[in-house]
């Protein structure tokens, strides 16, 4: 069973439906014992970092996630991925979960072309840097759907794939041990996204 | 590289696609779920559903359709039509919509934009506007393009983006239905004023019209209904054509 962590952030309809369509058993839950019982965890999220971190803290699930991430695959999606890093500079400075090295910064800060729009919204091609079982069914150059204004940088060796936006290599997929993150939305990335989720279900 | 987007728009009344036609290869193209499936397979980058029903019963049918589409089609879905309150946002987001577009609802109560952006994020709020030239000015129209609000459309867009709209659909009444090409002059005027993604609507008649549209770098997406529904233009063919012309396309 895949536990989709429910901490009051974001719309989980598509994520649950896409896992269902793949025949993967999934449960939206905020209960520590269900997360412990799951064989995989997905940490979703949309909105602002500080707000999401606060909500996650309120659930008391942070220690559970840190503990379980050592035992089983965990996938953070979009803001859920951003939460995995050391810290974020979205409206102030906020601590992340520290599961993946790196920091979250404003895309606008690093884009040299002011004509480029933020949010980075739409389909961008994925450049796979390091092969991984997560890409078992996905080819280099396939398009995935992004919607975000902040992005992860200084991720070092954790970066598995990125997408080019102007002068910036937007971190697309990261991994550190059992912990994975995608900045794009696999549940909104058509068949490419479904194939990625299928591979996650087989890790 | 970020791709330009091709977006078919489905107007839905009483659970059926308005102006949907029967294709030989498909059972029933007036059925929104069948049609959404077809567009997903032909490479549509996003789908827009406009609810043009007025009755509560029609509205119920609409949310049911949305739920069915969102359960099996995993590309971004935008919903518009009759969105006036946060409850309306909530109703369609719960059924699987990713973005919600407001038009007349924002004209009646502009605070809906900031309230929705605060609650659901900027990326969720699409400002849709119907615009027509009146005395040399780009004028905002309400009620499906029937009523001149007297408001300067470009000012309206700037204000909407300031309030948190994350994307704009610009529908030119002057070119809508004419199939003579998108309103490039109007679109450029908008692109010069706002920095959020712009979806062009109104006027697409041929593949060449899309090629002309995407020579304008400020435009992110092209939206059309009838030329796709009648299969005058096939989305897959269109995307191949545009890529051959050097436009970044997801294929």
Image: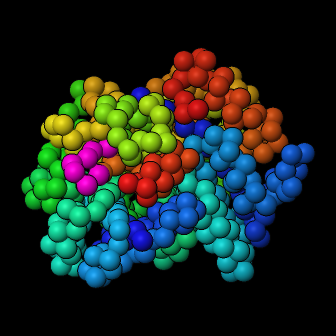
**Residue B146 in the image: above or below residue B82:** above
Residue at the image position 44 percent from the left and 51 percent from the top: A199
Where's residue A113, x and y in %? Answer: 28, 26
Q: Tell which of A164 and A23 is nearer to you.
A: A23
Residue A12 found in image quarter: bottom left
Where's residue B61, x and y in %? Answer: 71, 74
Where's residue B71, x and y in %? Answer: 59, 65
Q: Is residue B67 magenta?
A: no
Query: Does residue A12 appear left or right of residue B71 in this picture?
Result: left
Query: Does residue A83 appear left or right of residue B190 in this picture?
Result: left
Of the 4 image quadrants, the one containing the C terminus of chain B is: top right
Query: Does residue B117 appear left or right of residue A60 in this picture?
Result: right
Q: Tell which of A145 and B87 is nearer to you.
A: A145
Query: Does residue A54 appear left or right of residue B82 in this picture?
Result: left
Where's residue B88, x and y in %? Answer: 52, 73
- Observer able to see residue B117: yes
**Residue B94 in the image: above or below residue A168:** below
Query: Magenta stretch mostly in which secondary structure?
Result: strand
Q: Is residue A178 magenta?
A: yes
Q: Tell which of A94 and B227 is nearer to you.
A: A94
Q: Tell which of B103 and B132 is nearer to you.
A: B103
Counting every numbered tag in the picture gives 0
Residue at the image position 40 percent from the left and 35 percent from the top: A126
**Which residues fall within the magenta stretch?**
A173-180
The colour scheme used to paint the residues is rainbow
Residue A42 found in image quarter: bottom left
Residue at the image position 41 percent from the left and 28 percent from the top: B1
Q: Residue furthest top?
A: B245
- Observer able to see residue B142: no
Residue at the image position 28 percent from the left and 62 percent from the top: A72
């Amino acid at each position: 069973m895949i536990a989709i962590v429910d901490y009051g952030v974001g719309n989980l309809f598509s994520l649950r439906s896409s896992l269902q369509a793949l025949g993967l058993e999934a449960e939206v839950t905020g209960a520590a014992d269900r997360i412990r019982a799951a064989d995989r965890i997905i940490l979703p999220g949309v909105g602002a970092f500080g707000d999401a971190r606060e909500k996650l803290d309120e659930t008391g699930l942070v220690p559970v996630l840190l503990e379980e991430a050592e035992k089983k695959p965990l996938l953070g999606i979009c803001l859920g991925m951003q939460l995995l890093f050391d810290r974020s500079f979205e409206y102030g400075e906020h601590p992340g979960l520290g599961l993946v090295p790196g920091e979250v910064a404003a895309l606008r800060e690093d884009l040299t072309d002011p004509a480029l729009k933020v949010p980075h919204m739409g389909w961008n091609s994925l450049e796979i840097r390091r092969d991984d079982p997560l890409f078992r069914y996905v080819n280099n150059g396939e398009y995935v759907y992004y919607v975000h204004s902040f992005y992860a940088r200084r991720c070092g060796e954790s970066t598995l794939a990125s997408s080019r936006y102007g002068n910036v290599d937007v971190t697309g997929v990261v991994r550190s041990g059992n912990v994975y993150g995608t900045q794009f939305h696999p549940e909104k990335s058509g068949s490419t996204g479904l194939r990625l989720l299928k591979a996650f279900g087989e890790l | 590289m970020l791709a330009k987007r091709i977006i078919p728009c489905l107007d839905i009344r009483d659970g059926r696609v308005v102006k949907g036609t029967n294709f030989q290869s498909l059972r029933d193209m007036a059925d929104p779920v069948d049609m959404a499936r077809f567009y997903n397979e032909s490479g549509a980058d996003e789908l827009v559903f406009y609810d043009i029903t007025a009755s509560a019963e029609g509205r119920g049918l609409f949310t049911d359709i949305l739920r069915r589409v969102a359960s099996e089609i995993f590309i971004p879905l935008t919903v518009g039509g009759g969105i006036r309150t946060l409850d309306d946002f909530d109703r369609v987001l719960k059924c699987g919509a990713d973005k919600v577009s407001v038009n007349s609802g924002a004209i009646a109560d502009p605070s809906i934009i900031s309230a929705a952006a605060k609650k659901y994020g900027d990326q969720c709020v699409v400002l849709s506007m119907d615009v027509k030239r009146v005395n040399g000015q780009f004028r905002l129209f309400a009620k499906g393009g029937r009523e001149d609000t007297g408001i300067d459309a470009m000012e309206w867009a700037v204000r909407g983006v300031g309030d948190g709209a994350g994307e704009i659909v610009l529908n030119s009444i002057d070119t809508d239905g004419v199939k003579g090409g998108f309103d490039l002059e109007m679109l450029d005027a908008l692109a010069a004023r706002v920095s959020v993604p712009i979806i062009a609507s109104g006027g697409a008649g041929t593949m060449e019209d899309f090629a002309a549209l995407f020579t304008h770098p400020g435009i992110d997406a092209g939206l059309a209904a009838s030329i796709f529904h009648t299969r005058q233009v096939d989305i897959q063919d269109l995307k191949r054509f545009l890529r051959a012309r050097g436009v970044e396309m997801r294929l």
